[in-house]
Image (cartoon, rainbow, N blue to C red):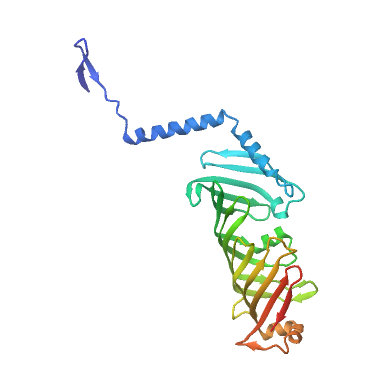
């Protein structure tokens, strides 16, 4: 211990109160954090956020939503939305939403604004993860290798077709807050199983399809362009390769199809579906494939084998 002289010339211990540099640097950050938490705890944050969100969700008369429970997650920097109510007009996929977690991930530079992450849990599909960038007048959503089970999608959409397998979705969707301006989406599956079933009075045998993929994008014109569609591989009993466009795709009644492609059927499938032999008896193959066109309104398309 060192001694130093005081003002009255007496000796006093010289005590050094220097703190470690790490503590000195982190103390202001902890102080700021506790200040923000204290402010939020003493302010009616949850009720204010709930009021703002619900007032905006109720604007849509076709599908009114309301969020009843909101929790602030201070450590993970986000909000948890639970107990979500929806009107009878909402689609079944919207009605099945159980909870949404909104997390803050920093600043976005394209567009300039906030970078957020969404984790959505549905009653039949769990953990849909979406990264979003929200600017002042536009937004961008990113799906990065989102994995979904076909059976869960079938149940959610109440589709009459039975399928099983896993889908991997990659894509980017961008637009302003009034409409989607563009998207680029890729969907793939290594294996899709189609059990034997009756679809519209037509008996389909069991199909095991591999190397399946779909690549599509949208533009401002309101058209959905299918850059490539591939169902099945050369080794499977069915293979379909196609590309085309769907105009006015947001309106099912007015949507117009324009597709062309080719398909190949193995003898094994022809034997299981004798009707195919009658339909394709006089049709010519080109390099082992039948050429086809699919045109007209989506509600009543015309299928033609060349």
Residue at the limit of the structure toward the top, as seen here: 8
Work out which quarter of the rendered image holds the N terminus and state it.
top left
Q: Quadrant of residue 50?
A: top right
Residue at image coords 32%, 30%: 19
Residue 212 at x, y percent in the picture: 60, 71
In depth, the one of 80 and 224 nearer the eye is 224
Relative horizontal placement of residue 84, taking residue 13 as reference (left or right): right
Q: Quadrant of residue 182?
A: bottom right
Residue at image coords 56%, 30%: 41
Residue 242 at x, y percent in the picture: 62, 75
Residue at the limit of the structure toward the front, as seen here: 221
Q: How many discs mark residues in the rendered view?
A: 0
Relative horizontal placement of residue 267, taking residue 119 as reference (left or right): right
In depth, the one of 262 and 296 nearer the eye is 296
In depth, the one of 223 and 262 nearer the eye is 223
Q: Quadrant of residue 218?
A: bottom right
Residue at image coords 59%, 62%: 219
In depth, the one of 238 and 50 nearer the eye is 50
Residue 222 at x, y percent in the picture: 64, 62
Relative horizontal placement of residue 166, taking residue 273 as reference (left or right): left
Residue 251 at x, y percent in the picture: 71, 61
Work out which quarter of the rendered image holds the C terminus and state it.
bottom right
Whether residue 213 is situated above or below residue 40 in the rendered picture:
below
Residue at image coords 35%, 32%: 24
Whether residue 212 is situated above or below residue 2 in the rendered picture:
below
């Amino acid at each position: 211990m060192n001694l130093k002289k005081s003002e009255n010339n007496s000796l006093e211990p010289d005590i050094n109160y220097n703190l470690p540099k790490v503590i000195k640097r982190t103390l202001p950050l902890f102080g700021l954090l506790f200040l923000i938490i204290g402010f939020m705890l003493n302010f009616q944050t949850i009720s204010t956020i709930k009021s703002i969100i619900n007032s905006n969700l109720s604007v849509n008369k076709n599908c009114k939503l309301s969020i009843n429970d909101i929790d602030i997650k201070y450590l993970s920097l986000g909000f948890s939305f639970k107990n979500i109510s929806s009107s009878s007009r909402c689609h079944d996929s919207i009605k099945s939403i159980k909870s949404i977690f909104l997390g803050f991930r920093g600043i976005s530079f394209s567009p300039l604004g906030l970078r957020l992450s969404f984790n959505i849990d549905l009653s039949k599909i769990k953990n849909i993860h979406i990264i979003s960038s929200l600017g002042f007048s536009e937004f961008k959503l990113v799906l990065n290798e989102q994995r979904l089970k076909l059976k869960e999608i079938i149940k959610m959409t109440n589709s009459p077709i039975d399928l099983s397998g896993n889908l991997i979705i990659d894509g980017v969707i961008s637009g302003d807050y009034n409409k989607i301006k563009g998207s680029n989406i890729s969907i793939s599956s290594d294996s899709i199983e189609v059990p034997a079933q009756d679809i519209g009075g037509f008996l389909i045998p069991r199909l095991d399809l591999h190397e399946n993929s779909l690549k599509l994008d949208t533009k401002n014109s309101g058209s959905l362009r299918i850059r490539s569609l591939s169902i099945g591989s050369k080794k499977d009993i069915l293979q379909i390769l196609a590309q085309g466009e769907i105009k006015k795709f947001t309106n099912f009644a007015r949507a117009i199809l324009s597709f062309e492609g080719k398909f190949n059927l193995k003898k094994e499938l022809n034997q299981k579906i004798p009707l195919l032999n009658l339909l394709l008896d006089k049709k010519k193959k080109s390099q082992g494939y039948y050429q086809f066109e699919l045109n007209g309104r989506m509600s009543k398309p015309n299928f033609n084998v060349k």
